[in-house]
Amino acid sequence: MAEAFKTLFSPGHTACAGCGQAIAARLVVDTAGANTIIANNTGCLEVFSAKYPETAWGVPWIHSLFENAAAVASGIEAALKYLGLKDKINIIAQAGDGGTADIGLQALSGMWERGHDILYVCYDNEAYMNTGVQRSGLTPFEANTSTSPIGKILATGNLRPKKPMPEIAFAHGIPYVATASVGYPQDIQRKVKKALAIKGPKYIQIHVSCPLGWRHAPNLTLDVSKLAVETGLYPLIEYENGKLTQVRKLTKVKPVEEYLKSQGRFKHILNSPDAIKLIQAIADSNIEKYGLIEKKA
Amino acid sequence: MKQFIEGSKAVALAVKLARPGVISAYPITPQTHIVEELAQLIADGEMKAEFVNVESEHSAASVVLGSTATGVRSFTATSSQGFLLMIEVLFNIAGMRLPLVMTCANRAISAPLNIWNDQQDSMTARDSGWIQLYAENNQEVVDLHIQAYKIAENKEIMLPVMVCMDGFILTHGAEVVDIPDQTLVDKFLPAFELSDKLDINNPKTLGAFADPDHYTEARYAMQVANDNALKIIPQVADEFKKIFGRVSGGLIEGYRIEDAEQVIVAMGSVVGTIKDVVDELRAEGKKAGVLKIVTYRPFPAEVVYRALKDIPQIAVLEKAVSLGASGPLHIDLKSVLCGREGKISRVSGFVIGLGGRDITKNSIREVFDSLSKEEVSCKFVGLKLG
């Protein structure tokens, strides 16, 4: 029998079955390796991985508050610089989408602007899942959440499209920005490895399905996440030094309906061609903007 | 070496002597001169430290939380609104048992907006677990900063310490201050060693979440650490005296209270003014005194009781108010003295000097005079109504 797989993110944590964030977080830390310090915002990942007196983490790991991992990581970086250890140790700050795009955005912007040598990872499951599926700035258009519910009078879900976090990161002029998806594990590993080889602030936003919040069976996590990419709704892109350098090309673009019908959070629009058309327009715009389809010569 | 310098510069020189490796701050009046001076010392190569300019006080506190957790002695400073923006992190730093030191340049809280001195800002953190030391003058400011690191880093304490100094009155006031020699400070304050830190050779999880089975014990441990601090703070002051030859710090300081019949209890720079009034009253044959609270948290209940138990008339004079109740120090003192044996007949509460209103010697005389009348719990001194 092969030697047991060694991980820096031990099993036995309390994540839900099929949690996309748990899979992605393990890929991130195992790719980064033991010479890594992690600062983690409050959120699902923090709660299910670090409940006293147990921990899933095999690297030095710190949790302080909901919105300050980027600043805490900045302090760790400054301390390592002072100690002359910075070049030997990776620093990762990580959070969910609310901790990144909403309450933690100011601290994150500061971290980017100051040029700290830190990789920031956002696990984007598109709502405040830890507190019971409330909408965040990264909740997609029309998603039914507990604070953008389908009511008798207001029968639409979330009224706004996702905040363009990768572009906001890009606008800070940082050397590396990428999106990834838990549906593509090797792509996550490649991007984390690449990011950690670059000096300065890096941002990776990983789309991670939440079976509970998205309302799909726990065994479909990777399939549903893949569909978001295959429809053009979650383009996988890389910006390096101010330029769009790589995108994951789509060989066959799937209609957004396939993605929408895989999850209960979009159930209310499945009989509404107009709403589906608006979401298809978001996917089409992404395909055009990032050149997701290979143009034949 | 004795120097005629501004209080903020004195703080910067004291902090430099403590050899912090990371400093982070965000500008707010009247704290700014402190961090400007530190930035200059670093820029001039007179001090080796990383200075992190952040986008808010919330992040300033978070940066030094991270650097302290990495095992590097750190420093921050703030005031007023910045203090309030920091406060979520301040509670967290104490709960994580990180021995940070900060300066609060005391300033009023908005609204109405006001940049001048009172102590409402640091008072809002009295339940945070931070040790709070209040300075009377800039010599004490220097001495308390050096002692603060030694108190915070004591293994029986491991709590952060804030040195509170009255904004403008002390931060922008210049006086002669003895800045200790580096060799003596190094003797007094050993290098910082943190056992539970972020270290790739010994990976630990910091800031774990605690369910109802564990949370109470974590908070109880902080209460025990506060009790320990009440024993250790006087020891630190004794050691300071041995090395630097100066009495400074500790829990309380009584001035002419031994045979006093009227005593004002106060904190910070106003104590100096009260001492002058006490001298005048004594010259007039009145038995007046003043009790200075240096360590406000943990509250030194027993030593305060012993100092005051035979004083018939006590006034608490403070630059903060728990709106809807009375001054925080007044509330603390009442709880300490209530039902205890002694000659105390009244403990009156007075609020004074809010938002930088000058505290005159006459207004302090009024407080002494009114002590022989009925007890009051929250009298605003010098109100201009109508």
Image (spheres, coloured by chain):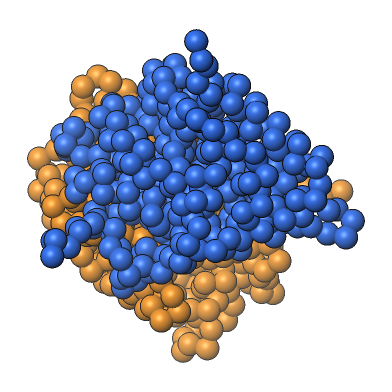
Chain colours: A blue, B orange
Residue B189 x, y percent position in the rendering: 16, 50
Relative depth, front residue between B132 and B86: B86
Residue B56 vertical placement versus A225 (above, below): above
Residue A63 vertical placement versus A258 (above, below): below
Residue B209 x, y percent position in the rendering: 40, 67
Q: Residue at x 36, y 45 (%)?
A: A185
Relative depth, front residue between A150 and A96: A150
Residue B201 vertical placement versus B310 (above, below): above
Question: Quarter holding the N terminus of chain A?
Answer: bottom left
Residue most extreme to the top: A297
Residue most extreme to the right: A153
Residue A199 x, y percent position in the rendering: 28, 26
Q: Quadrant of residue B364?
A: bottom right
Specify whether residue B320 is in view: no
A267 vs B268, left or right, is right
Residue A185 vertical placement versus B267 (above, below): above
A149 vs B166, left or right, is right
Q: How many marks?
A: 0
B171 vs B380, left or right, is left
Relative depth, front residue between B213 and A126: A126
Q: Residue at x 40, y 43 (%)?
A: A184
Q: Residue at x 53, y 25 (%)?
A: A292
Q: Residue at x 69, y 35 (%)?
A: A280
Q: Quadrant of residue A79?
A: top left
Residue B336 x, y percent position in the rendering: 48, 79
Specify whether residue B338 is in view: yes
